[in-house]
Image (cartoon, rainbow, N blue to C red):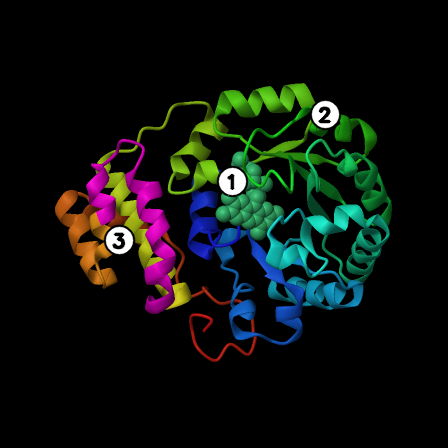
Amino acid sequence: MAGVSVQAFRRQGRRYGAGLVCSEMVSCAGLQHRNERTLGYLRIASDEHPLAVQIFGSEPATMAAAARMVEDAGADLVDINFGCPVRKVTKTGAGATLLEDPDRACRIVSAVAEAIDVPVTVKMRRGLEDGSRACLEVGPRLVDAGAASLTLHPRSARQMYTGFADHSLTAELVERVEVPVVASGDITSHARAEAVLATTGASAVMVGRAAQGNPWALQEIVEGEPAQPTREEVVAELMLFIRETVRELGETRATSFLKKFYGWYLGRGRFPRQFKAELTQLPMIADVEQRLLIAAPGAADVLERLESELPVGDEIELDLPISIYGGG
Ligand SMILES: Cc1cc2nc3c(=O)[nH]c(=O)nc-3n(C[C@H](O)[C@H](O)[C@H](O)COP(=O)(O)O)c2cc1C
């Protein structure tokens, strides 16, 4: 998820039971121009595997070159984005727009599949307009072009994140292709995951928003046992997330990036509402950490244990021209 799936998020997801994690979407044009921030998305830690890195773009040759860089960086899968509904992306002919241009979409998939040895997968929406069934026409063609798996988020691009994911389309897609289909959209609990798997025949579910500030949701989805974290556990996970994100993005970028996460972690009735507002006003990360520890002093011990369990010294596995540690 763009603006969410930083390395800290992915490592946390793996710790809480996710079988596969995915990067934010990475611009193939950004990789082509060796944009420093874009290259930063290719930083992979050893405890993230298996990891998919998702790329977006509209030119087959540029996408193929980007896929080679992603493979060299150590990704286990290269995923192609045919789902992004955001205008900044669709106006360049990338993302969900490609569902309306199946020939180009197929050329992209086959160029990428020919360029690399790791599997190529595709993530898509149902189509551009409400009620569209484009995914059912395009999906099988993408498989013929070389997609090893398809993930469907069955909302239209126009819907953005409103309404519901219509997983009856997921079931139809499963019927039409021989490769694994992953169901994305509104998977928030073990019960929901089981129901979607049973009614669609999908091979796996993908969890997005439910895991934001809530890795315990992943645990519940995987194990089926309610996972109720203590205040100390919540604060410790948030503090670890803050520290890892500062290391990854640098303090300036991390300070604004992290604000949305305070609400996600501290909401859900875990802390009073004004506490989140108070944290977002604090100018320095050190102040945020101090305030969190006042609210849950026992979190310090939990944090120490979490930090001691993380692998050290392997944060960067790739040799790329990233001049500033933190990706710029
Ligand atoms: C903030 C945000 C960023 C997202 N970024 C991406 C992305 O970069 N690539 C992608 O394939 N889907 C992206 N998505 C869509 C999710 O992968 C997922 O399909 C969608 O949120 C529905 O699943 P959910 O109900 O579990 O969140 C994003 C969703 C959100 C909310």
Would residue 23 be visible to someone looking at this image? yes
Q: CA distance from mark 2 to mark 3?
A: 42 Å
Q: Position of residue 130 (x, y in %)?
A: 68, 34
The numbered mark at residue 280 is 3
Kind of residue sitting beneath label 2 = Ala
Kind of residue sitting beneath label 3 = Thr
Question: In the rendered structure, which disc, 2 or 3, sits on the residue that comes first in sequence?
Answer: 2
For residue 137, side relative to residue 83 (left or right): right
In the rendered image, which residue does mark 1 sit on?
208
Q: Main secondary structure of the magenta part?
A: helix
Q: Position of residue 149 (x, y in %)?
A: 73, 42
Label 1 CB, ligand 1: below 8 Å?
yes
Question: In the rendered structure, which disc, 3 or 1, sits on the residue that comes first in sequence?
Answer: 1
Of badges 3 and 1, nearer the viewer stands 3
Image quadrant assignment for residue 311? bottom left
In this rendering, the answer to whether 328 lies above or below 259 is below
For residue 167, side relative to residue 139 (left or right): left
Would residue 20 be visible to someone looking at this image? no
In the rendered image, which residue does mark 2 sit on?
171
Question: In the rendered structure, which disc, 1 or 2, sits on the residue that comes first in sequence?
Answer: 2
Q: Which residues are magenta?
A: 251-277
In this rendering, the answer to whether 212 lies above or below 172 is below
User: Which quadrant contains ligand 1?
Assistant: top right
Residue, x 64% and y 53% (percent of image)? 76
Residue 267 lies in magenta, yes or no? yes
Q: CA distance from mark 3 to mark 1?
A: 23 Å
